[in-house]
Amino acid sequence: PNLSFWVQEEGNRPDLLCGRSADYTLEKAHFTVLVCSTIFLGGLLRAFLKNSEVIVLMILSLFGFLIGQLAYSSVQVHQIIYPLLRTPSFSLYCYFSPLIIFMTALDVDFYILKNVFWQVLLTGLISFSTAFIIIGFVVLKFHKDSWDFHSCLLFSMTLGIIDPVHAVNSLKTIGISKVYTDIIRGESMIICGFTSIFFGVLRSNLLSISSFKELHIIIGLGLDIFGSIVCGYWCARIIQFILTDLFSNTLTNIVLCISMVYMTFYIVEFLRMSGMVALVTVGLNLDSLSFKPKIELIIIKFLIMFSYVFQHLIYTFFGIVIGCAEIKYIQFHNIVFMFVLFVTVCFARLVTVVLVSPILKHSSYEYNWRWAVVIAWSGIKGVFSLLLAPDIHNLAEQKVESPQLFILYIQVISLMTMGINSYMMTHSARTLGLCAISLPRQMAMQNAIKHIQEIIQNRITLFKTEKILTNVNWTLVEEKTRIEYIIPFAHTSCDKKAKEECPTDEVLIEEARLHIAIIQMSSFEKQCNDGVLGAEAARTLIGAAKSYCHIQGKFMSIYDVSTYVRAKSWLIKFKRLLILLEYHKDKISPFLYENNKFLTFVYHIVFSEEFEYAGYIIAIIYIYPMIMHLWPMARELNVSALILVNYYFVFLYLLESTLKIIILKRKYFHQHWNTLEFFIVIIGFVDMFCIYFVKLRPDNLVLIQFTVIIGYFRIIRFIPLIKIIIPLLINVVDGQIKKRMSLMYSITKGYVKSQEDTKFLIRQISSRESVNQKLYEILEINKRDAVKELGLIEHEGRDVVIALKTKQAIRNVIAKALKNLTFLWSRGIIDKHEGVEVNKVLLTKIKSLNNFPMAIPPPTPDKYLHNIVWLENKDAFIEFFKDRAKLAYFDYGDIICKEGEMPQGIYLIISGMAILQSSLPTLGIERSLRAQRESTTRFTEYCTSGDIIGELNCLLKREFEYTAICETILQACFISLEDLYEGFDVFWPSLEYKIWLKLALSIAYKYFESSLIDEDLTFQKCVVLNHAYVETLSSYKEVTIDNVNMKFVIVVYGSVIDTKTEMPYLAPCILPKTCEEVQGTSGVSKLLIIQASEPVKNNNTKARGSAHTVLKHPRETITGRETSW
């Protein structure tokens, strides 16, 4: 192993860089002081020079150089840096590089890199080759006499490395798209990986380039690349498993993450592969979903902190090493050579960009000459070049007198490129308009700022009503909270400015499409963090969204994201094949042979399990004779024994087939496996006769060849063993089909939720109404397609969907319990120790859901009555309708109900899916009053298991406003209109009221979910605790609205008018706070009133009385059915 930075010839003691050996006792504590001082100085400089990292590194390099010069002339200083000088250069590489490369790879978006993988790979190889050739040529010309050929090649290879950290840091600060920074980082990581592999192969070959052979290079590169990738992938899976553990805390996650990074690097290097490539693979395979919520940000902060500390130490340490050299080696021509190297590095990068531009133009992302100019300045060198610089001397065949020059050149070039190239990158990007924000983007940002300002103003208005804040200077508050945000880089590029003066709807829709993709990805991640969506499903959705995001005009649909059809098809076909091959016994009644004792005896033998297993044992025993038959030497020594054994086994197969034929007769050949056994017997007899004829005519060459070929057919005697594993394979395939179906259902459900989340934010994306309408239609169509897919999946795998829904319900209940526990804990009601113990119990229950069964048998039809929410799972209600409910069956394409027909009853869907088609729902409003809302498109909705058709129409005894058509075979529980109204009479008035409450809640959430997102309006709470209730208004009936005690008043059916302003309000709508009294204007109107969580007492007696009438006795306002409609 290396004992110092520079390895000398074998048998000589390595010399120290400062030219003298230590004749004193080493005290390592001094070096620790140096390390701490460097870290402190670096942190202090970063605090004062926030945006000048290159200046910080330059000062630290000069600081190290001065310490090295002092060490050269002072024993006391030499004693401090002595541990550094005795540290092997490869050790420093192993200390510092793993964490930096892992942090870089973790910051790269895997899906972006996957879309342009081949372009980035070719770019990296071309960049490495171009820099290697051009820099190597220049170095050979300038250092032909002092450096050998191997040193020049290793130096050019090291200087060709692009630093993945500093190459994009300057671009990230000016808002450049992550796509282009990830492309540059991907290229630099490929160069780093390839260089580390090459240096690793050199180290493993006894530090000698001359010992290389072509075979060594090919095997070494293949093992390093593919072996390292495989190791990195499995290490990423292990890290992901550890970091997603529910019982681990933040500190444990940080320690485990960092330690696993180093463990991965050291284990892979120990196996003679590339730890650098392995860590790149680990970082690319981890994403935000690989960590517990909010842990990723903390881990990244720690990685950034360590990265900066390591860079400060590296530049200081190598400055010390340079300073330990004699000044006579640093002359004027060395300074000139540094500038020549800088120009060469920039020229090599320019040539690379010219060569790779045709490749990058074929990428999925926009690439033009402006980006080529910016990328031409991205060849920034950094810590990875420095860490490999000492190996130039160590691995070279001839040692030079001044090895410090290798480090000096690379360190100076890295500082020059960090300063000059970084400035030129940002300057070019700004000058060429790559940082410019397009006009549609500016409009979107202004719209968002306007929305934030409205929220602030609404909050101020709400605060003004609180008595405790009456003395506040609200003018000053409004002045200080007013947002005056100047959009950075708001100018547009010159060639596009005229075009973007007034963007068309298509341009705004394209900008909104990118926003929608971001909103959807945020929704997927939030659903995963909340436990609603599995990590694999969320990762699939996010990956699909990123893959389709760059396609202009493409809104991701459920058909785009799904690979389900292809995966499902081959699995089902394979299962059908296995079922076809599965062995089934043909059962025959034993009474047919009761008069014949022999046949009865044979019958019991053939249909016994012992007989079946005896056939398997015969096939297994024959394995050894078959091996001897295939082995030429063993076959020649045991010819007679093998012939006799063959006769014996053919007789056993014959006996087995004969017994089956005696019992089964013609049915024997109905089973494929029986036909195979019969064929084995026939081949066995042909084999025996061939051997017999060969003995008679040993000189017949054709007969001998035919006998040898027939002998190899004995292998088919092992095929019946497959019967044993077929049932196991069927179970495995069935499990995979259910797993895939469960995953697809989760993916589709998560997609539907993201579409709903996006629809609520459309008005914040764009302020143009025509754009909003088009976006809404696109999202609605995509949602309908996804709901249809949900119904088809549920119809195909009811047991899988039931298991998934049950598991999700358990998860939601436990999550609610955890939320309540956190609230009690924060209020001090539960002690800390007690809270920790209860938290462990709940987390254990969540963790146990990992072993939840993949499928649960569907309940019987009568059990589905318990799922009707307005029956409240009460025995009296269920027993009443259980005796009256009937099962109804519909085939594909059957019409359940037609638009314009009178309802016959309600249908509770048990299995299958139906599609509802109609114009837009009227909700009790004349279509003439909705002229402005009319649309030429038909309204479409899908109903699946658990949904009810016809509730509203039965309540009102009015015609259907939609046509329900079966999309699959459908089974439903039918409750007739007469039985339903009989139930209303028996359970008057609660049952009818509960149906209205359920419908009102569903209508409110359907249209106003964004406003009600903070309200806990479950049906049970509304019934028991009266959080919300339904108020009935007939024509000309008035109701007073108490805005203090009523948080929301929503018109869910019919229409009302403000008695003061005579402003009409049509369902569905939320009444404004300015509305004090409303009057019904339609035949029947329904208001959903959501009460404030803490009603405020009002001194106004009249108002209190009016509120009391509504709040205290909401159900008393329901009059008889005959007066309601």
Image: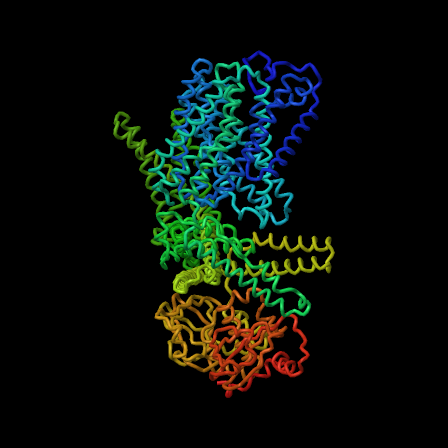
Q: Quadrant of the N terminus?
A: top right
The single residue placed furthest to the top in the displayed view is: 11
The residue drawn where x is 64% and y is 47% is 249
Residue 264, quarter of the rendered image: top right
Q: Is residue 1020 above or below residue 820?
A: below
Q: Is 755 located above or below residue 183 in the figure?
A: below
Q: Where is residue 541 in the image (x, y as percent from the top left)?
A: 46, 52
- Examine the rendered structure and indicate whether residue 975 appears above or below residue 180: below
- For the residue pair 652 and 1042, the one nearer the viewer reads as 1042
Q: How is the image coloured?
A: rainbow
Residue 23's spot in the image, x, y percent?
Answer: 69, 14
**Location of residue 719 by image quarter:** top left
Q: Which residue lies furthest to the bottom in this view?
A: 1122
Q: Quadrant of residue 806?
A: bottom right
Residue 936 falls left or right of residue 175: left
Foreground of the two, 600 or 442: 442
Judged left or right of residue 281, residue 134 is left
**Is 684 in front, or is 463?**
463
Q: Position of residue 387 (x, y in %)?
A: 53, 27
The answer to whether one can see residue 43 in this image is yes
Q: In the image, what residue occupies the spot 59% across and 17% down?
A: 17
Q: How many labels does the image show?
A: 0
Residue 992 sits above or below residue 248 on the image: below
Q: Where is residue 144 in the image (x, y as percent from the top left)?
A: 43, 15
Q: Can residue 795 be seen in this view?
A: no
